Structure formats: structure tokens, C-alpha cells
Image (cartoon, grey):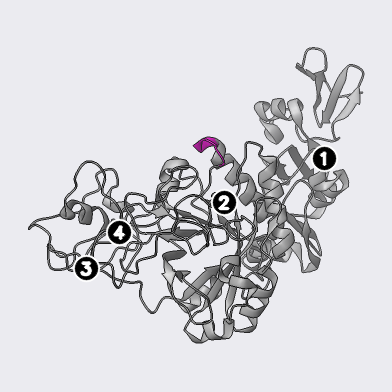
Amino acid sequence: MRSTHRPGRYPTTRGTDGDAGPVGIPIRPGTPLPPGTVFPRPDRPDAMAAQASPSGPIRPSSAVPVRRTDAAGHTPRHRSSPARTTRTTRTTRTTRTTRTTRTTRTTRTTLAIPLPRRLLSVAALTAATLTMSGTAGVAQGATPSPLWPRGVDVASWQHPGGGPIDWLAARGSGLSFAIIKATEGTNYTNPFFVADRAAATQAGLVVGAYHYARPTQSLSTAVEQARHFIAVTGLTRTAGHLAPVLDLEDTGGLDPRALAAWTRAFLEEVESETGRIPIIYTYRSFWTGKMADTHDFVKYPFWFAIYNDQATPGWLPGGWSTWALWQYTSGGAVPGIAGNVDTNVLCCTSSALTAQADGTHSEIEKWYAAAGPTQANLGAPVGVENPAGGGGRWQQYGNGLAFWSVATGVHALYGPISTKYLGAGGSNSFLRRPVSDIEIAGAPGAQQARFQGGWIYWHPATGAHEVHGRILQTYLTLGGSTSSLGLPTTDEYSVPGGRESTFQHGRLHWDATTNKITTLPPLG
């Protein structure tokens, strides 16, 4: 997904933000360690170790990405950093540059990176990146379970000279899925995306798409990039398509709070448009440093990049308790794909892969299938699900409707309250989106529904009426439908100098000059 990453606790190449990437120092398996050597990480409790190996939690170190750019200057791999100038020393295959040849793990016998000024022992370096085996004091190399579905992520880099990928050969090697770079920023589209996705699908692979994020100070660019991504990939609302992926490894100069806000805006726009919860791809040091290790994104499936020569990825940042995908090397060799390629596993069965790749059911559809008595009140679906005004999606039913948004979840309306809501303009109105289902109100025999911008009450004797703004705040303070005012008998209406709502036993008047609410007797 990104540019090529290279093992190293201390970076041989830095990203544009100076961040370290997903690898650890390559110590040859079997290196002797002093007796009693342990692998502590005092700032991370053991409880945060996810998918621990049978011998205990794995605590690999952070890692360092080595970035590549394609011929057009775009980051070609899954996750790439901004294009670098061709005069810098880098570990790539590009010509006309000074290159450091790639040392494979099978032949590497010494540290592949320079040590820091403070001399560190082999034992200390090993302790930072490897876990102990059952025999204390020996560093052990390992790989992910062969039972876990394996896949690759590719970009234009895997098309040297414009040649195609042989996806049938790749599938025949045991691959189960392929995730393909679709877009970057607001303008770039991978010219091989459409053909790669079609060919990989035809070869029998589950497919996915990712967007390489280019954050900026303006939140509007998050929405623009999300829409560019969706315009290229479509809604992926079919079987065999993984959820959309955000490749996050560039800050764009934003501090953690601004970067989190940008990230949230992108993810929510994608989710609102597609009805699918996107996947986040990143690596540990980026999340802990550039995102301040925020725990606000745990609802999103986590694609973790860590090259640790272990059987599991180790402890997870950001409060994630599980990982959905693990990019465990950038040096994979796959028949049909030129050169090294990012290789991944999905946690942790073929049935889990099928479930992750099922885009046929939206949040509303999944909710409706489990709605129980509410399903009977709504009746059967009418037509297809559609985008809702103000964001989100909605579905009409024989006797009502269901709305969904990232901010509110799924809520159903039916009967007179749904009729009133649609008559007011639905989610395009001042009421905006529902934040509750139909509820039993405090007054006997009454119902209510709450919205982002107001409430609607209904009773057979009074009908359905909305209350909102300062009048609603005062009404609720007085006790709402259980107050001495009773239920509303009108919507809010204009009067000289302000607004009013009429109730069974009185009125509430809002003065536009003073912004105060006054309780008045009923008319007549």
C-alpha cells in the first residue's frame, strides 16, 4: 500500500514528517542473548498486547518506511509518502539515482542500518524488536500462520514499463485477496486501477481499493479527496469487495488534533456515501506520534503495518484490541507480480475474509434484518436505499422509513410521526436527522421521536406536531409532555415580535428582542 518499507529501529530513510515506519532491526534468528533477558515496554501495559503468541505478548519495535515514487511522481505503493527528489539516496529500483541495494532477509547476517551514537548492545537491540522463544535468551524469527488468508497490495510500481500483472498466476500461488491503490490526494488516479481490479476479480481474488491521504489545513479537502476516491472506486456494494481503505501516513504538516479532524472528515464522508465502514491503514509510530495515539477511531477496522519477523503483529496502538489486516513485509515475492510487493494477511479465517468482503448489506439493511417488532411496524422495503439530505442514507418502507448517518446510527420512523417528518422536509428540514426511534411519551397514549433539531409528538387526540429551538428547551425543562402544558396542538408559528407554540393547556412565547420564553394561557 505504500512505498517500500525497510526494517530498521533507527531509520535509514525518513518520511517527509521524519516519522519512523513499520519495521524493526533485523537480528538473525538464533542470536544468543544474556541469561534473563526480558522485553519490557513500561509505557504499554500487557493488556494492550493483541493476538499474543502462545509464549506471551510480542513487543516489536517501531519501524521506518522507505518511500518510492512512480514515474509520475506519485507514491505508487499502498501507502506512500510524498515524492522525493531524485538526488537523494534511497532504497528503490529507480534509475539515475544513488541506490542502496536491498538485502533480503534470507541472506542478511548483520544489522542493515547504522547504530545511533550511543552504542547499543546486540542484546538491547534484540530486546527492542524480538520476543523470547520458549528457550530463554534466543531470538526467534517467525511468520504469520499459513492458515490466515494471504494477499497483496499493489500500485503503479508493480507495472514496470506499463506491463500487466498476471493475476491468474498470483491467485495460483495461494493469494486470496488484492488491494489496489486507486487514488491519491484530490487529482491523482492510478492508471492501472480499473484493469487491475477487473483482472484480479476475474482471477477469483477478493479485491479492495485504497486512497493515499494528502491532509491539508482545510477540512474541505478531506471531503474532496473522499469524493474523488469514491468517484473512481464506486460504492463497492457487492460481494467480493473489501471496504474502502484510507492509507494514512502523511500529516501534511498538521498537528495531531487537526490531523484527527481531517481523518474523521474523510472517513465519515466515505461511510456516508457508501454505507460501509472504511478501513484505516497506518503503522505504529505514525499513530502514536502523529495522531497522539488517539483512541477515537477504534470503530474502524485496523490494517496494521509492522515488519517484525514474528508470528503476530504485537501490541496495537490507538486502543484497537484486534487487527483486521496485517502488512507483515514489503519484500514479498509473488508469481505474476514484478519485483517485491507488500504482503498481508487477514485475521484470521477464510470465512472472516468473506464477511469482510461482503458489501451487499448496508447499515440500514443489517439493522432491518434484526429489527424484530419494528420491522413489522415498518412493513416491507419500497424501492432502494438512497443518500439522505444532510448526509447519511435512508430507506422507505410500506409504513415508514429508516435513516442512517455516521453521527446518529440507524433510526426508524413510522405512522403519523413519519408523515409529519417528511411533510416538514425530512432530513433537509430544520429537524435534520432522527436520533431516536418512535418512543412512548410521558403523556398516556402519546408517542414521540427526537431529532437533531427538534422533537415530534403524536397523540390520537392532538395529532403530530413538532417543537424545536428555545421553546423546546423550555418545554422540556417544565417536564415536556408530562408538564402542566400537556401535548402540543400546533407546530411552532410566527407571531408579532417572535414565535409561539400552542399546547393543550397553554402557550410558550419566544420574544425575538429579549430571547426570553414566556408562558401564556391558552387562546380563547
Vertically, is 501 above or below 337? above
The residue that label 2 is drawn on is 83
Q: Which residues are magenta?
A: 252-257
Whether pointer 4 and pointer 3 mark residues with C-beta atoms closer than 8 Å, the reply is: no
Secondary structure type for disc 1: strand
Residue located beneath label 1 in the image: 465
Instruction: Estimate the spatial distance between the alpha carbons at disc 1 and disc 3, rounded to whole Å.
Output: 73 Å
Proximity of marks 1 and 3: CB atoms separated by less than 8 Å: no
Q: Nearer the viewer, residue 132 or 462?
A: 132
Above or below — where is 354 with respect to 433?
Answer: below
**The quadrant where residue 473 appears:** top right
Secondary structure that dominates the magenta span: loop
Question: Circle 1: is it few (<14), some (14-19), or many (20+) Cα within 10 Å?
Answer: many
Name which residue type carries label 1: His
Q: Which residue is the site of mark 4?
A: 112
Reply above or below: 196 against 312: below
